[in-house]
Amino acid sequence: MAEKQYTLAILVNNHSGVLMRVVGLFSRRGYNIDSLSVGITENPSISRITIVVTGDRAVVEQIKKQVEKLVDVIKVYEMTRHGSVQRELVLVKVRTTEQTRTSVVELAEIFKAKVLDVTPSTISLQLTGGLDKIGSFLELMNPYGIVEMSRTGITALERGSRSLCDIDYEDPGAVGERADQ
């Protein structure tokens, strides 16, 4: 079976140590995390962990079941490419000269990247978008020389009006099959 990338949105109680337990599970099981993004939600008592992993369908199903069993995990959702909006922020510093600076700026404009800083030998850019857009942009910047790069990791929202935090806490089935219930 072919491996592909899967995006998981994990809603957790906003307590210290929860992220360590979730990431520790991945580490103990030998699952590599391609991308990780964490933050509180519109409800301050709930945090959202967005993790991108590569594997086959069986591996992802196993990951979801194991993560849902952890204490303080409310629910694990799989965010599909078509059923969600997925974005990442990248900051990239590119080597330039007087001769190449204009070309780099023109490419940045095509991708709607923002110029953050310019020095005689570099230009720093900010770009947001999906993995394909960011990948294409970085591929075009590579020949100029990427001096430094920082990426936030994927964050995602389900399409439509429903919120993943719209959970009926009185309904045990709404929060998944957890070992602590």
Image (cartoon, helix red, strand yellow):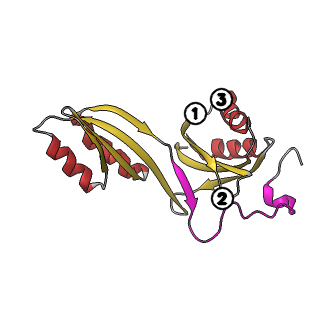
The location of residue 16, given as percent across then percent down, is 73, 37
Element under disc 2: loop
Q: Is residue 97 magenta?
A: no
Q: Among all residues in the image, which is located at the extreme right? A: 181
Q: Work out whether mark 2 precedes mark 1 in sequence or the reverse, and give the earlier one.
A: 1
Q: The residue under label 2 is which amino acid type? A: Glu
Does 155 lie within the magenta span? yes
Q: Which residues are magenta?
A: 154-176
Q: Earlier in the sequence, mark 1 or mark 3?
A: 3
Residue corresponding to mark 1: 32
**Tag 3 residue:** 27
Question: Is there a contact, CB below 8 Å, between mark 2 and mark 1?
Answer: no
Residue designated by label 2: 42
Disc 2 crowd, CA 10 A, few/some/many (<14, 14-19, 20+) = few
Q: Nearer the viewer, residue 71 or 53?
A: 71
Viewer-proximal residue among 28 and 11: 11
With 101 as the anchor, is 172 left or right in this view? Answer: right
Q: Amino acid at mark 1?
A: Asn
- Counting from the top left corner in percent of width and height, residue 179 is at 86, 44
Q: Residues within 10 Å of mark 3 (few under 14, many from 20)?
A: few
